[in-house]
Image: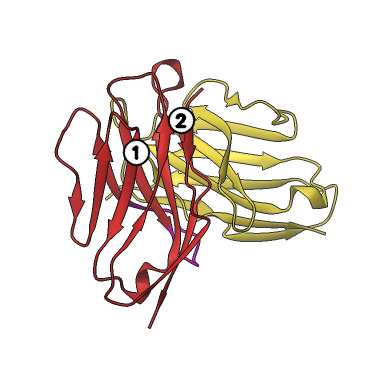
Chain colours: A yellow, B red
Amino acid sequence: GAVVSQHPSWVICKSGTSVKIECRSLDFQATTMFWYRQFPKQSLMLMATSNEGSKATYEQGVEKDKFLINHASLTLSTLTVTSAHPEDSSFYICSALPGLNQETQYFGPGTRLLVL
Amino acid sequence: AQTVTQSQPEMSVQEAETVTLSCTYDTSENNYYLFWYKQPPSRQMILVIRQEAYKQQNATENRFSVNFQKAAKSFSLKISDSQRGDTAMYFCAFPAGGTSYGKLTFGQGTILTVHP
């Protein structure tokens, strides 16, 4: 149980285009999902907290207009990288909390984004 | 602010030997959870073990165990009988409470290599 999927697993796009990444909890409902960014051999950096039915909460320094997050249902959150540039190339990981009073986050397999 | 520190950027161990990864943290809270996650070359984050601070007994999951020292704010991970499949980057993580429910603060990570 507690499986989280991400789609796509990798994507290459041209500079200036937008890319949408989906995060789904497959066998549980997630009121809260998180989006992280990770550079090679570095730790995970939290970008935003996504709560179902409400606006995402962004971490300091993360541009909310560039990284649009939508949490439309209890099993789906999406991250859209708008007007992508090469510096947005990174590994993006989502995680989900299976309900209130649940402390353990379950992670998706990640999405590798390369912007040319 | 809560901080998590992993002071060992890289470690290596021979198969079948035991290795200990260190983690220290800083918090003013009294009840909380602590986690160890591993990230193998596939980059999928996998929960290794979790510890509840109010429990005095150290958590154990098969070959993985922790040495939790609450007063010293130390949370080390011991891997016994190391296997090639344990090769991964290991992260210690600490969740924020209160209004930041569920947010994880990660340590810098320790790259563990298990040699044959």
User: In the depicted view, which residue is nearer to us: B30 or A83?
Assistant: B30
Which numbered circle lies on residue B32? Answer: none
Question: Magenta segment range?
Answer: B39-48
What residue is disc 2 on? B103
Q: Tag 1: Cα neighbours inside 10 Å, few (<14), some, or many (≥20)?
A: some
**Residue B110 rendering spot, x and y as whole percentages:** 48, 56
**On screen, B13 above or below B27?**
below
Q: Chain of mark 2?
A: B
> What secondary structure characterizes most of the magenta part?
loop
**On screen, A3 above or below B85?**
above
**On screen, B41 above or below A69?**
below
The reply to whether residue A103 is in sight is: no
- The verdict on residue B33 being magenta is no
**Residue A94 rendering spot, x and y as whole percentages:** 51, 44
Q: Secondary structure at mark 2?
A: loop
- The verdict on residue B41 being magenta is yes
Q: Disc 1 or disc 2, which is closer to the eye?
A: 1
- Residue at left offset 49%, top offset 48%: B7
Three-letter amino acid code of the residue under disc 2: Lys
Same-subunit check for callouts 1 and 2: yes
Three-letter amino acid code of the residue under disc 1: Ser
**Residue B103 rendering spot, x and y as whole percentages:** 46, 30
Residue at the outermost bottom position: B116
Q: Chain of mark 1?
A: B
Residue at the outermost left position: B57
First in residue order: circle 1 vs circle 2: 1
Q: Tag 2: Cα neighbours inside 10 Å, few (<14), some, or many (≥20)?
A: many
Is A48 on the left or on the right of B35, as rendered? right
Which numbered circle lies on residue B74? Answer: 1
